[in-house]
Structure formats: structure tokens, C-alpha cells
Amino acid sequence: MSDSTANRLPTNVRPKHYDLTVVTDLVNSTFYGTVKVKLDVQEQTSQIIFHTKDLELYQLVVYSDVLGIGQTAASTSFDTKTERAIVTLSTALPASSKAVLDVRFTAGLTDSLIGYYRSVGGTDAKDICSITQFEPTSARQALPCWDEPLLKATFAVTLISRADTVNLSNMPIVSEVGYATGLDAWLDGRLANSNDQWKMTRFETTPPVAQVSFASLLNFDSFADVYIFVGVREWSFCVSGKLLHESSERENPTAAFAGFALDVKRQALVLYEQVFQIEYPLPKLDTLVVSDFDANAMENWARSPSESGLITGRNSAFLLDPKAESLNVKRQIATTVTHEVAHMWLVLFSDTVLFGNITTMEWWDNLYLNEGFATLMAKVTILGEEQYQI
């Protein structure tokens, strides 16, 4: 690995957990929220430096378990070149202590295809959803964070949106209720200006993940023409003896367009289990397809039997019109699907996990290892299908 320490955040504190709440306003193309980041203080310091870009930050407070006080930032400055915020405290945090950084933030939902953005689709361009794309360094455009691949942390996510929308994230839903005041005074004040009904969706806490793998602050109009094919929600199958929910094309007309990608995903899961002699460990593998997406597709992962994987991508990467299909289009979709499924896999050798989402490169110059493995597996899988031979 090349020496890139000059580009890295200081090591005086390390994030361990993010308690993240995000309000998504699709009508006004904005989002805002709060994040409480639990920190391990590695050395005595009066500065906390983290990544942020295109976010307005408010009410920065740092709590210390040893000092027993909450300190409002004495000063906050921003380095736009390195996309960092520098928070300076009046009283230094002791070494080997615990701290919590509490921040409020706001930003607009842009059409940039990175960070947390909006996707517009449908024949009349009225189908709007919001979605994340963090790889490689765009998590900082969705929340204040330590946006480096080695700095893994757990995430507890709460999404607040209008009552007629749908929320998804990497993890299963814990609860979904109507929003009631009292969660946070700052959020209450902003939501008080709206006459609409809002709801609050809480998700299970993730395992330790890098910001690049954590994703999917997904919010869309429940009546929008957004294609979703989901492991246990829509079009499902039986993998490793796990019988999942099934539905038919009659129940959902978009199933005909998603059917080919679903069939490839099912075959790839079974094949990878046979090749690696390791069962797919998650109960489902969701795929969300939207009109606008920066990459062809993106894998977002979680790693225990109670957790869920999620693949996000654009329509052209997954949807096949049965009336206008071609061998070339089918080959492209099959390659994309098998590539993304390969990212989910855990390749275990002598208790070492290689190239899967359970491990992450230390720095971006090793990204080729992660992508190279998935590309190789996709090519090998497709080469085994005679119908896709060139």
C-alpha cells in the first residue's frame, strides 16, 4: 500500500458507533438530521476532525464520560480542499476516555448521483425517490462522518418521512410508527412547519461497517414507478433450504421485467455455495432498481443471519423487457447480477476472509482487490453458460 497518511484523518479519536436520524423531504428536495457519534479517545486532544461536504452543520456538542460535561465547540472551521470539519474544544478530552460528538445537519437532495440524492423516473418524471451512493468518498455528503474504509463502526438508523412513502435500509425494520414530538427538539421545530403526516422507521443496528458499505437511506413515494425485487418482500426463491416468500407476475406486473435478473441471482447464489462450500449466510438479498444511479450497481452488505444484504442499481442494469430482449442485453444483466452477488460472498480460507464485504481495503488504492474478485467471479460464472458465449 502506498504511503497516503498525509491524506488520512488524525488518529486521536476513532468512531465506534453512529446513531443516525434522517428526515427526508421529497416534496422540497431536502434532508436534515442528527447524528451522535460514539468515539474512543486514543490520545489527549482538544480537536476532533471529521469529513463533511455540502452539509450545513448546527449545534455541535461533545460529551465526555470522564469530564462529565457537554462542551459546545469553541470554534468550528472547514477545509474545503480536504472536505474536513475541525472542531476545537475549550477543555481537552483525556486519553483512553469515551466521547460523543452530537451534530445537526441539513442539505439539499441534488441530482448529482452521489451522496444522498434524488432519482427521478417514470414517463411523466413524477416518480421521485431518494437514494445513497457512497463509494468511494461520498458518505460525507450525507452525514458528518469518518469517511475512510478502515474506520469501521456500527450504525443505528432511523428514517423519518411522509406517511405515504416507503423507507429501506441495509437492515431489517425494527419498528415503524407515526412521528410524535419529543425525539429531538431541533427536529420537532423543523417538522412543526409541515401540515403533513410523518412516520418514523427504525432499523436494526448494523455490524461494524465502513461508510462505503453502509448505505441505503432509501425513501420513495409508495405510488411511484420504482422497481423493487426483494428477497422476502416481492420475488423470492428457496436458497439453502430457506423457503422465502413467493409472488407471481399477476400480483406485480413489473415481475416480468425483473424475472430474468431474479433467475440469474437465484442461480448465482446456488452456484457460489457449491464453489465455496459455504452457505449464503443471510436470510435475503434485496435489489432496488431506480432510474438514476451513478454506478451500474452497488452492493451494500450486512453479515449475520438476522441482517440483510441490499443491491442498488439502475433500471438498465437489471430490467429486461421480454418483448425486446437480446442476447447481448441478457449477457450484460447476467454479468452485473453475478458481479454484485459475488461481492456478498464470504470467501473463507484458514479463518481469513478475502475480498468480500466482511473485509474492507485499508485505503482506496486497494479497491481493485475487491472489484477484481467480483469481476473474476462474474466472468467465470458467465463463461459457464453456453448461451452467453461470444
Image (cartoon, rainbow, N blue to C red):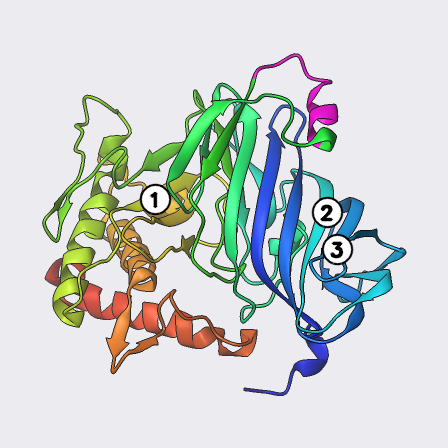
Q: Is residue 358 above or below residue 139?
A: below
Is residue 188 within the magenta segment? yes
Q: Residue at x 62, y 41 (%)?
A: 111
Q: From mark 1 to mark 3, how far is it between C-alphas?
A: 45 Å
Question: Where residue 97 appears, x then y in whole percent?
Answer: 67, 67
| Res. 389 visible in picture | no
Instruction: State the SS at label 3.
Output: loop
- Image quadrant in which the N terminus is located: bottom right
Q: Is residue 127 left or right of residue 194?
A: left
For discs 1 and 3, the disc positioned in front in the rendered view: 3
Is residue 225 within the magenta segment? no
Question: Where residue 228 appears, x then y in whole percent?
Answer: 35, 35
Of label 1 and label 3, which has the lower sequence position? 3
Of label 3 and label 2, which has the lower sequence position? 3
| Amino acid type for the residue under numbered disc 1 | Thr
Question: Where residue 321 appears, x then y in whole percent?
Answer: 27, 36
Q: Nearer the viewer, residue 388 or 183?
A: 183
Local packing at callout 2 (Cα closer than 10 Å; few below 14, some 14-19, many 20+) is some
Dot 3 corresponds to which residue? 68
Local packing at callout 3 (Cα closer than 10 Å; few below 14, some 14-19, many 20+) is few
Dot 2 corresponds to which residue? 103
Q: From mark 3 to mark 2, how far is it between C-alphas?
A: 18 Å
Could you say which disc has been placed on residue 287 in the image? 1
Q: Is residue 136 left or right of residue 388?
A: right
Of label 1 and label 2, which has the lower sequence position? 2
| Amino acid type for the residue under numbered disc 3 | Gly
- Give the magenta range: 187-197
Question: Where residue 24 appears, x then y in whole percent?
Answer: 60, 32
